[in-house]
């Protein structure tokens, strides 16, 4: 595939003008003048063939570096390497294409490479779905050495990216979360506490935690970091029903909730807690019994990788009954769903009451910021007042559902899509600190 360059179009235009002028000329030279265009046309065709024959001599090397794994909803960076091993200057244009499971800007980028020089660039993709996927193709075209034609070339490799749920970043982990099996407590030493590690004294540490023998040995005031002997059971119920397909920004509600569950499970395992996971729609779809440690984390992430939305209405009651069978003692039950599913007489509310009779129930849901802004936005279309009224009614119903759930003893966490995971993790840390479960 070739594309005529601007210079080529100018030359073609000039040939056309010569041909038209030759047709207009009269007299004894009219036959010769009418054929004057043939010579520059033949030279143009010969020049194009010469450009094609000279392409291998350009020795242009194009490659890209694709990571093997990416996290759902986090930017994936693909590095692009272009090297000019030829003897002349090269002009090249690159444009990536990508499948629907990625979101990116397919911008056209131009490069000018001197002989023996290289250029490194990158472009970003945003994974929108779980599973294995190809990052797409790279379309390139190089300008011939005479500047007449752009020569097309498609870069396609066998690279695949495995999109997995998001994990805890090392930056967000506190000191206690880096020690698998326990969390650090800075409270005064109590019964049920075990020694973990020494560290230097910091302002605010209780004097009771100072280890005077370690201080004398190191000539620095040292304190004892203790762990609380607390093991908590937690069941996570993930809604994969019809409403989980709704978009919340770039990702669907299900994929936002998958990221929340993945990070919450990792945090719980780091604290030594036992976790169970159930995905459900009109019935339980997959289930993981109570597990802990690396084995529990791997099993939970395997379930999350295979989580898919189904076009059926959600029935939390069936999942709640299954959770009661899994949990022997009082435990924390986290439900990630859409609050618009619940009203006082629904199976949603019945399930919350059923679980709340023995366990601590936390319902987490995504706030649609676009709908909230729509309530008070100005009218520019005759349908805008009706849209504002619908948004007001939607938010009112969510507030009523939240109030009813709190009356039934459940805790409700609502936040924007990019803040829900932080809100849920902070609430979990607070529960552990207060030993509320």
Image (spheres, rainbow, N blue to C red):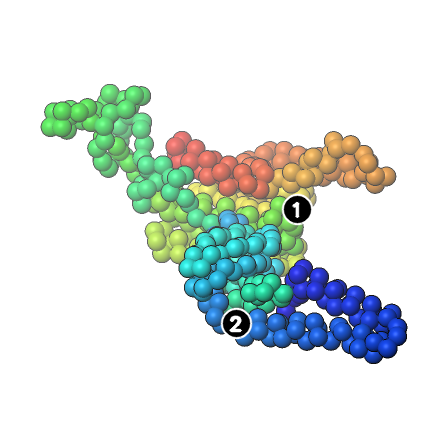
Q: Is residue 389 left or right of residue 335?
A: right
Q: Earlier in the sequence, mark 2 or mark 1?
A: 2
Q: Is residue 198 above or below residue 110?
A: above
State the CA–CA distance, disc 2 to disc 1. 66 Å
Reading the image, the residue beneath label 1 is 341
Left or right placement of residue 263 versus residue 216 in this view: right
Q: Residue furthest left?
A: 217
Residue found at x 57% / y 54%: 109
Q: Which mark is residue 73?
A: none
Residue occupying the point 63% across, 53% down: 245
Between 159 and 148, the one lying in front of the other is 148
The residue under the point 74% across, 31% down is 376
Q: Nearer the viewer, mark 2 or mark 1?
A: 2
Q: Are marks 2 and 1 in contact (CB under 8 Å)?
A: no
| Residue 344 visible (yes or no) | no
Whether residue 64 sits left or right of residue 175 in the image: it is right
| Residue 161 percent across, percent down from the top left | 48, 61
Q: Give me the disc on residue 54.
A: 2
In this rendering, the count of numbered labels is: 2
- Residue 242, percent from left and from top: 65, 54
Residue 177 image-quadrant placement: top left
As helix, strand or loop, the secondary structure at mark 2 comes to loop
Q: Residue at x 35, y 45 (%)?
A: 270
> Can see residue 126?
yes
**Can you give x and y, in whole percent of width and height, for residue 111 in the image?**
53, 55
Quarter occupied by residue 368 = top right
- Quadrant of the snapshot with the C terminus: top left
Q: Secondary structure at mark 1?
A: helix
124, 30: nearer the viewer = 30
Of the 4 image quadrants, the one containing the N terminus is bottom right
């Amino acid at each position: 595939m070739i594309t005529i360059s601007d210079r080529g179009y100018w030359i073609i235009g000039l040939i056309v003008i010569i041909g038209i002028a030759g047709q207009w000329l009269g007299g004894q030279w009219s036959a010769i003048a009418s054929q004057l265009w043939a010579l520059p046309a033949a030279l143009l065709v010969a020049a194009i063939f010469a450009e094609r024959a000279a392409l291998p001599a350009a020795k242009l090397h194009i490659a890209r570096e694709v990571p093997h794994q990416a996290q759902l909803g986090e930017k994936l960076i693909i590095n692009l390497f272009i090297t000019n091993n030829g003897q002349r200057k090269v002009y090249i244009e690159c444009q990536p294409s990508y499948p629907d499971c990625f979101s990116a800007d397919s911008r056209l980028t131009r490069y000018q490479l001197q002989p023996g020089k290289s250029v490194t660039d990158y472009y970003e993709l945003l994974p929108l779905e779980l599973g294995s996927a190809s990052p797409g193709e790279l379309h390139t075209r190089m300008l011939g050495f005479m500047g007449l034609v752009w020569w097309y070339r498609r870069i396609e490799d066998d690279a695949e990216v495995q999109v997995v749920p998001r994990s805890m970043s090392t930056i967000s982990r506190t000191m206690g979360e880096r020690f698998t099996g326990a969390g650090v407590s800075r409270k005064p030493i109590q019964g049920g506490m075990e020694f973990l590690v020494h560290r230097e004294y910091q302002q605010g540490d209780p004097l009771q935690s100072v280890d005077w023998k370690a201080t004398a040995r190191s000539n620095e005031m040292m304190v004892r970091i203790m762990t609380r002997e607390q093991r908590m059971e937690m069941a996570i119920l993930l809604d994969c029903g019809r409403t989980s397909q709704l978009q919340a920004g770039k990702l669907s509600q299900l994929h936002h909730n998958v990221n929340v569950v993945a990070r919450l499970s990792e945090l719980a395992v780091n604290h030594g807690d036992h976790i169970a996971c159930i995905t459900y729609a009109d019935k339980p779809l997959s289930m993981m019994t109570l597990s802990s440690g690396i084995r529990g984390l791997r099993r939970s992430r395997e379930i999350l990788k295979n989580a898919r939305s189904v076009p059926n209405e959600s029935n939390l009651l069936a999942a709640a009954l299954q959770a009661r069978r899994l949990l022997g003692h009082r435990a924390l039950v986290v439900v990630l769903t859409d609050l618009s599913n619940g009203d006082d007489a629904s199976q949603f509310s019945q399930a919350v009451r059923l679980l709340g009779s023995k366990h601590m129930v936390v319902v987490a849901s995504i706030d649609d910021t676009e709908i909230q802004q729509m309530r008070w936005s100005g009218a520019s279309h005759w349908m805008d007042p009706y849209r504002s009224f619908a948004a007001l009614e939607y938010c009112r119903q969510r507030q009523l559902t939240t109030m009813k759930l709190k009356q039934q003893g459940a805790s409700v966490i609502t936040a924007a899509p990019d803040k829900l995971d932080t809100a849920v993790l902070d609430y979990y840390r607070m529960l552990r600190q207060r030993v509320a479960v």
